[in-house]
Image (cartoon, helix red, strand yellow):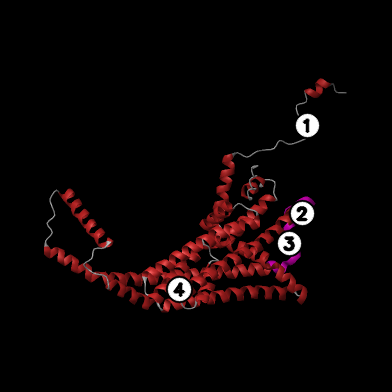
Amino acid sequence: MQTDDEDDDDPLPRRTHKPRVRSSAATNLLAALAVVAVLWWGQRFLIPLTAGLMLVMLVTPLSVTLEHWLRSRTLATLITLAVVMGTLAAGGMIFGGQLVRVAERTPEMISMAAAKLAERDPGAESVVSRARIALQELDRATERVMSGKPPRPTKRVVAAAAAAAAASAPNTITAGATVALREGAVTGSSALLEFTANLSIVFLIAFFVLIGGKPLTERFLGLWGEHPEVQSRAEKALLECAHQVRVYLGVLIVTNALIGAAVWLAFWATGLPDAGGWGITAGLLHVIPYLGMAVLTGLGAAETFLAHGSLGSAAAMAAFIIVMSTLIGTVVTAWLQGRAAKMNPAAVFVGLVFWGSIWGLWGLFLGPALVVVMKVVAAHTRAGQRLAHLMQEAPPEPKEPA
């Protein structure tokens, strides 16, 4: 029989609960940097995988409905993906048609720009000419200081230099334009091939995941453990992620429709041809945040210059598109996305910048949905409660009594 003293001298006392190990701030920072490095390094694999899984979340209701009607999961999956590919192809044809139209009228635009430049008074001093004269004076002063002797330019040397500059200017512009077109064609072709390859992988991933159906989803949920509570939490998180991806598509459709309507009204009011086609093009380009509107700004300014022959009208159209896309594409989109997902608009915008810097164009396209998915996953895990609280929408401030 043991006494109380013997119990106190037991070298291995029993513990009912294990102490909770807390990671330090340095460990958390290193883990975050490691995640960012993995996201950047593995983007060739992670981008198609993420886009494919989001496509599955988006089209699952349509696929399930078609499967219920057709009694064939394979046929329903093929029809669903065919509808998506047909929609993308139609949008690409509309945008491509507008782009080809502007490209065919590029020589006319160059001729008009040359005529506008020729109408300027060669004797009038411009900002460029005064800046060039100031730089030449700076060069002469620097040469005087470095050599210790004043430079002795002669009229003959000055006239010869001016003639050489005037003779080489057209050749320089032509050569630069040729090189730019050649490099642009090569870069555009490689980017188009890479986009096509990624898109093919996206559809293949979506096809095989949709073919797997409910059994694949159950096996995926089983990866999180056999405890019923854990599986229930994972299932709720998955359903909420799918819902938020569809909400993101709805927000995208609304904002794209607003931008398309604004561009159509602006083109119609200024008498530009094919205002409806340009409105559709604007809605399609807004799928890619920021960069799509930058392309639309250039195309809209070029079309306005071709129609009116005025640099002022082209600049006004470009300014309108920039202001409109900033208000609708950034402010309204962030506000709608935040309201729909009950998130802070600042978190949506910061997340968009983060994913755009990591994954480029794909990050700009997938960024808003990825931010919402991150918030949903964090809200359904104990370790991510603080992150979810940070990203969620701020509660309204209480009104002060009158």
Q: Is residue 342 above or below residue 110?
A: above
Identified by mark 1, the residue type is Arg
Three-letter amino acid code of the residue under disc 3: Thr
- Kindly identify which residue carries mark 1: 14
Which residue sits at x=26%, y=63%?
Answer: 126
First-in-chain label (2 vs 1): 1
Which secondary structure dominates the residues rendered in magenta?
Answer: helix
User: Is tag 2's residue or tag 3's residue first in the polypeptide sequence?
Assistant: 3
Q: Residues within 10 Å of mark 1 (few under 14, many from 20)?
A: few
- Nearest to the eye among marks 3 and 1: give it: 3
**CA separation in Å, label 2 and label 3:** 13 Å
Residue 144 percent location from the top left of the image: 16, 51
Residue 72, position in %: x, y?
Answer: 75, 75
Residue, disc 3: 217
Asked if the residues shown at circle 3 and circle 1 are in contact, with their CB atoms under 8 angstroms apart, the answer is: no
Q: CA distance from mark 3 to mark 1?
A: 42 Å
The residue indicated by pointer 2 is 232
Closer to us: mark 4 or mark 2? 4
**Mark nearer the viewer, 2 or 3:** 2
Residue in the picture at 37% in, 72% down: 310
